[in-house]
Amino acid sequence: MTLTIALLKTAIYLLKHQKEKRHCFRLEKEGKIAERDALVEKHVPAWATYMIDMVGNKQNVINVKGKENIPQDGSVVFVANHQSYLDIPLLISTSKKPVGFIAKYEILKIPLLSDWMKLMQCVFLKRQSPRQSVQAMSKAVETIKKGYSLVIFPEGHRSKCNEIKAFHPGSFKLAFRSEVPIIPVTIDGSYHLYEENKKPMPGNVNITFHPAVATAGLTKEEQNGVIDKVFEVIKAELPQATL
């Protein structure tokens, strides 16, 4: 399958679910947030599973470890390494917990996708604008405090390989300000699904959810220690990971 065909199939899938999307926005406008969230939690994981099956022609092998480390109740911040465009659907489909993402502001230009991301409570960040970045971070903290969980990729960009790049400390402000647990996540092999061959391919992916790391009431020094700890925990599960 070529990338063009994969994108076309994705667009068609989203177009087929326009009715459900509009229903979600109507519920939101009417203040029926719980009903909106229930529909989002039904349709978004289905989309994520469709994406993974489509890219790998249903031949992908997704191994998941540590799901018992994900709290059933309450918000968390998932902190993961970033290998592929497919990391987002992989985390949605394997975490079994409603999640949003800190996403690039440019995604707002893609209505079919960005509308669903808004319903997921994703936060859009314009990195070149310090003022907007501050506003986005405040919105993200509010989102967490409302009970939603978010995912951050502190490398900033896809590695497109099994190496892990240094984490940007500023990415952790969300967890420290909201004082919710961090769930470190190791994504191993997702770059095989597209980036390795520059086209959609089947492959084996290992997703590991590590034990929660507390963030409440930490000193600045302790916060720095958390950043180092989370990095090392994620790195240790990667084969021959290097900086």
Image (cartoon, helix red, strand yellow):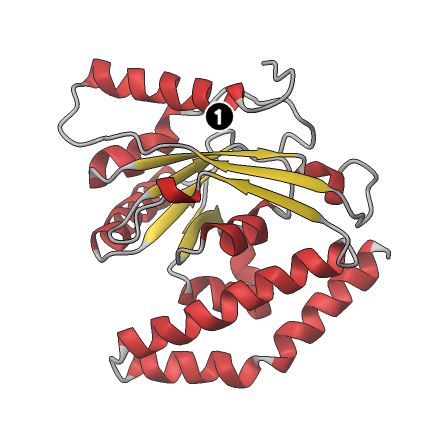
Q: Position of residue 53 (x, y in %)?
A: 71, 59
Residue lying furthest left in this view?
Answer: 217
Q: Which residue sits at x=32%, y=35%?
A: 182
Left or right: 143 in relation to 98: left
Residue 15: quarter of image: bottom right
Residue extending furthest toward the right: 1
Residue 16 left/right relative to 57? left
The one of 103 and 230 positioned closer to us in this rendering: 230
In the figure, 44 relative to 62: above or below? below
Which residue is tagged 1? 234
Can you see residue 122?
A: no
Quadrant hosting residue 130: top left
Query: How dense is the environment of label 1, judged by Cα within 10 Å: few (below 14), some, or many (20 and up)?
Result: many
When the figure is inspected, residue 18 is found, relative to residue 156, above or below; the finding is below
Instruction: Tell whether 97 sits left or right of 159.
Output: left
Judging depth in this view, the residue of 227 and 203 nearest the camera is 203
Residue at x-position 41% and y-position 32%:
210
Q: Amino acid at mark 1?
A: Ile
Which residue lies at the image location 50% right of the left edge and 36% below the top edge? Answer: 208
- The answer to whether residue 158 is left or right of residue 235 is right
- Whether residue 80 is situated above or below residue 8 in the rendered picture: above
